[in-house]
Amino acid sequence: MKRIAIAALAAGAMVAGSASAATNLVMNGSFETGTLDWVYSGVGDDVPGHKATIIDYNSGAGYPTGAFGEPIPFDDSASPSPDAVGSHAAYFVADHSTETLSQTVSLDVGLYTIGFSVYVPFNGFNNSGNATFTGTVAGVNLANFTVDGTTPGVWKHYAGVANITVAGDYLTSFTYDSGLAPAGDFVVDRAYIVAGNVVPEPSTWALMITGFGGAGAMLRRRRQAAVAA
């Protein structure tokens, strides 16, 4: 059992190491510059009054540096992004407007791990106006959903693998489309494109699960032996 547990820990370290050693091809994918330096477009009743902005985590500040007084927790979703969570995230909140943050990334032929994280604040979820979020990375649509169709207060990660067969420029974009005021809102963080498939294979997960099960069994036996003594 001990050998299997050690193998599982090694497998976990290998997965974490492969992600942390990778390079994120999305520029400022975690919005840590503190500025909205992606390509921005926006139209509607609430632009530029409440255009997309960069907010601070766990801040009770109002717009534009906070989510109207609601502290947003750090992105705790499981993500193979090579970027640390950091202190900032992108925030969409304009009423009755359509906004897009985008950038193109030049990719060679091959496999790429892609993804991002999204959070729906409680304030926006409770607003009467709905809003739609669409997320595309490396030309692959990973998410398209509405505020009222999600669970608020939970970071959710969307990921996939892009198979690039023709080298060229591929679009990464986040589009926010809101309805009546006050509308729902979204927080986005850790957008990434990483060369290769850094998501663990099923066999690796099986090894890790078996190893953790073995480690648990050892701990139970040790507790039983201690009680018996």
Image (cartoon, helix red, strand yellow):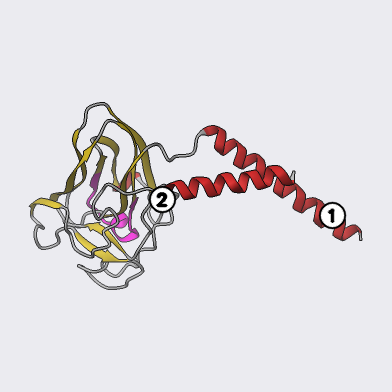
Q: Nearer the viewer, residue 215 or 169?
A: 169
Mark 1 sits on what residue?
Answer: 224
Q: Residues within 10 Å of mark 1 (few under 14, many from 20)?
A: few
Q: Amino acid at mark 1?
A: Gln
Q: Amino acid at mark 2?
A: Ala
Q: Nearer the viewer, residue 31 or 120?
A: 31
**Residue at horizontal 53%, vertical 33%?**
202
Query: Picture coordinates of residue 170 (x, y %)?
Result: 20, 37
Q: Are marks 2 and 1 in contact (CB under 8 Å)?
A: no
Q: Which residues are magenta?
A: 118-133
Examine the rendered structure and indicate whether residue 64 appears above or below residue 105.
below
Query: Picture coordinates of residue 2 (x, y %)?
Result: 73, 47
Q: Nearer the viewer, residue 173 or 1?
A: 1
Disc nearer the start of the sequence (2/1): 2
In reply to whether residue 160 is colored magenta, the answer given is no
Q: Is residue 121 visible?
A: yes
Mark 2 sits on what residue?
Answer: 21
- Indicate left or right for 226 with 168 as reference: right
Q: Regarding mark 1 in the picture, which secondary structure is present there? A: helix
Residue situated furthest right in the rendering: 229
**Residue at horizontal 25%, vertical 38%?**
138
**Mark identifier at residue 153:** none
Query: Picture coordinates of residue 16 (x, y %)?
Result: 48, 49
Distance CA(mark 2)–CA(mark 1): 41 Å
Query: Picture coordinates of residue 134 (x, y %)?
Result: 24, 42
